[in-house]
Amino acid sequence: MNPSGEIITMHKAIALGAALFAFWLVLSGHYTPFLLAMGMFSVLLTLLIVQRMDAIAPEVTPSHLRPGLITYWCWLAVEIIKSSAAVARVILSPRPAIAQKIIFVPTSQTSDMGRVIFANSITLTPGTVTVETQDGYFTVHALNEAAADLAALAAMDKRVSAVEARR
């Protein structure tokens, strides 16, 4: 590996370590010296494992936390809430309108990370589950006709591709 590649990897490892330690601090809520040392030890152990797995790669590090992705997460959260309400209405209805179907959703992402974000976004949205991924399309199970809205899924695909392009 060339020296500049090692420097980039080191920067990514430091950024990942800082993000993990900050996350640990927020979740812990305890700031005694012993617990801070244990938190630092757990982060260093995690970084060692990640480094040995060779998982510090361009598509796996916090460098993707750009404003476009944050905006996408906010939009996705709203979509999850709207879909949750729609699924709750279907389930709580005296005569549920459940008409399960399998649909094929075309994808336009160019990277594995883009496809992962899109597939997981579909699965996170209540009423839909990504069943299989293929080059160029996903197989998706939908709870009913409303969840099988290809136009809405195409809009999600377009948003993920826009986030992917901003990298």
Image (cartoon, rainbow, N blue to C red):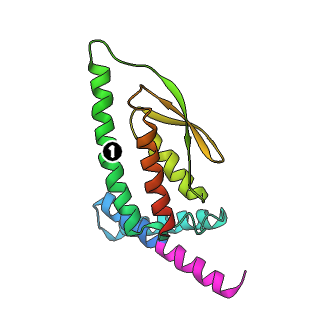
Give the residue at mark 1: 79
Question: Dividing the picture into quarters, in which one does residue 38 lie?
Answer: bottom left
Residue 50 screen position, x and y as percent: 59, 63
Q: Where 99 sits versus 84, above or below?
A: above
Q: Is residue 21 magenta?
A: no
Magenta-drawn segment: 1-15
- On the image, the x and y values in percent for residue 126 come to 38, 35
Quadrant for the N terminus in the image = bottom right
Looking at the rendered structure, the kind of residue marked 1 is Glu
Q: Quadrant of residue 71?
A: bottom left
Please state which of residues 127 and 158 is positioned toward the viewer in this rendering.
Answer: 158
Q: Main secondary structure of the magenta part?
A: helix
Q: Can you give x and y, in whole percent of width and height, for residue 73 in the image?
A: 36, 55
Q: Is residue 124 visible?
A: no
Residue occupying image coordinates x 27% and y 33% = 85
Crowding at dot 1, Cα within 10 Å, few <14 / some 14-19 / many 20+, comes out as some
- Residue 128 falls left or right of residue 133: left
- The correct choice, above or below, for 129 with respect to 97 in the image is below
